[in-house]
Amino acid sequence: MRREWSIARRLFFAHALFVVVLTTVIGTALFVDARDQGYVGTSSRMLAVATAIADSPLVLAASESADPSTSLQPYALELTTDAGLDFITIMAPDRTRWTHPNPAEIGQDYIGAIEPARSGTAFTETSTGTLGPSVRAVVPVTDAAGTVRALVAVGTTTTNIEIALNARLPSVLGLALVLLASGSVATWLLGRYLRRVTLGWGPERIAQLFVYYDSVLHSVREGLVLVDLHGDLVLYNDQAAQLLGIPPRPAAGSTEQPTTLTALNLTPSLGELLRSGRTAHDEVHVTDTRVLVVSQEPAASTSAPGGKPTPMGFVATIRDHTDLQHLGSELQSMQTLSDALRAQTHEHSNRLHTIVSLMELGRTDQALEFATKDLELSQQLADEMVGSVDEPVISALIMGKSAQANELGIALTVTASGTLAQSGLSIQDLVTVLGNLVDNALDAAAAGADPRRVSVTVSSTELAVTIEVADSGCGVAPEVIDDVLRFGFSTKGVGTAEPVRSVGGRGLGLALVRQAVTRLGGTLTIGRREGAVFTVTIPAGEHD
């Protein structure tokens, strides 16, 4: 099986090759530049020396003599040695040499171009003469009238120039080696970093994993949220967007910047959890429309086996428990009815024993009278409940709460007007609102002083349904009115107003009431008379 190269290894070899090519190009450019500068400098020096010789009166005077070589040859040889040149040739305008490093060449024709100099213009060139390739300058010698009397050619062979260039070659090679070494070290360090952050995976593997993870995000039915250490929402799936009420995430490959959590309209408790990054297990958070169960764990990367994990962010999973919570509320109502039936069964058992005992004692008339009055009292209670509320489920709920109130020694009174059947509200919403408000009122009245009372008023019109639940408890303190409807806030038992975050904890009932009322477009107010008064107003009509 072919082993896939990691991104770090690929980048290392690609960058190393790039450094080698770059070093070669730069080294060649430096060498060519040094060579060109050497030729330019040599040409300038040759021109300067040739001009100085041409301006010498000795040369002009010798050019007018019968044997110029006699005086010019020693002079040329001395200057050649002193200036470190290869040759100085002084010639007649017709190319006849008067001087030359090789005396045998005196009297021979000069090899090379002289036409510009014969016209009175000095010039430089690179050409091949009797001493080999050379860089030379040719300057005319003119008299006072401007007539060219002689020509001076000064030059040095290219071999000497190459020696000078070779003297600079070590510095060029040293610079190239420094570039190669520094580039290799930088590439190695970058490769180590990439190997650590990519876990040694190749680009094909990373692309494959990305496709897999993107498919998983779409297929998971729970909300999944990834938050980085700066509080930015890096990644989330479609279910999370739906549960949190945020825009769908950008398509794969989008260059859109991560969304900051503070820019999202999240509930305070949920926003605090995601920003804090603390570990959480099955925390319940109530939004305006949903009951969410959130778990959060840190996300860390380990560069090597046994290495210290490096935190990279946090992963939160979000589950929707709204429907489950509604079922729980309905189950609680059924439990209330069950407890009421149990209490009534117990009471009826006592009454039957009383009737049987009276009959065994022969007091038939008294037994009949006791049974008749008990039947009338039970029928009166049922008639009052059924007559007050025209919705059978709500009537059953109130009867159950009435039995529960009797067990607690609380007087529960119910007043109803209008018809709930035509209000357009679902039975589940009515059970959630009314059941939780009555439960809260019973708890408050049970903790208060005698006489303990709870009153429920339900009125329905064409415009709205109004539910008012009042108790004889201690009421709600003004400073906690804003907090009493928040999930986790509870004033029951020890540890007043302590938030509870686990499923099934206190402080959920009123939060569910607020959620349902908000979803239905209604209002919830908290007042005070003898105790607390909770008033809910919900517009009538069809509701989702």
Image (cartoon, rainbow, N blue to C red):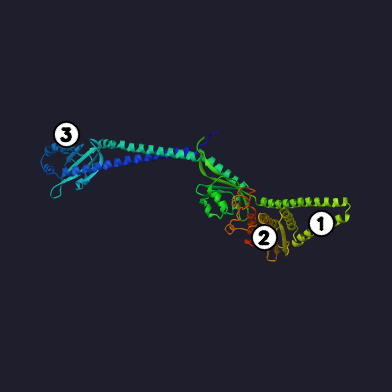
Left or right of 424 in this view: 163: left
Whether residue 94 appears in this view of the structure is no
Q: Residues within 10 Å of mark 3 (few under 14, many from 20)?
A: few
Q: Residues within 10 Å of mark 1 (few under 14, many from 20)?
A: some
Q: Secondary structure at mark 2?
A: strand
For the point 17% across and 40% down, which residue is it?
90
Q: Which mark is residue 103?
A: 3
- Report the front residue among 233 and 391: 391
Q: CA distance from mark 1 to mark 3?
A: 158 Å
Residue 140 at x, y percent in the picture:
18, 45
- Total labels drawn: 3
Q: Which mark is residue 470?
A: 2
Residue 500 at x, y percent in the picture:
60, 49
Which of disc 1 and disc 2 is earlier in sequence? 1
Q: Is residue 373 above or below residue 4?
A: below
Which of disc 3 and disc 1 is earlier in sequence? 3
The type of residue carrying mark 2 is Ala
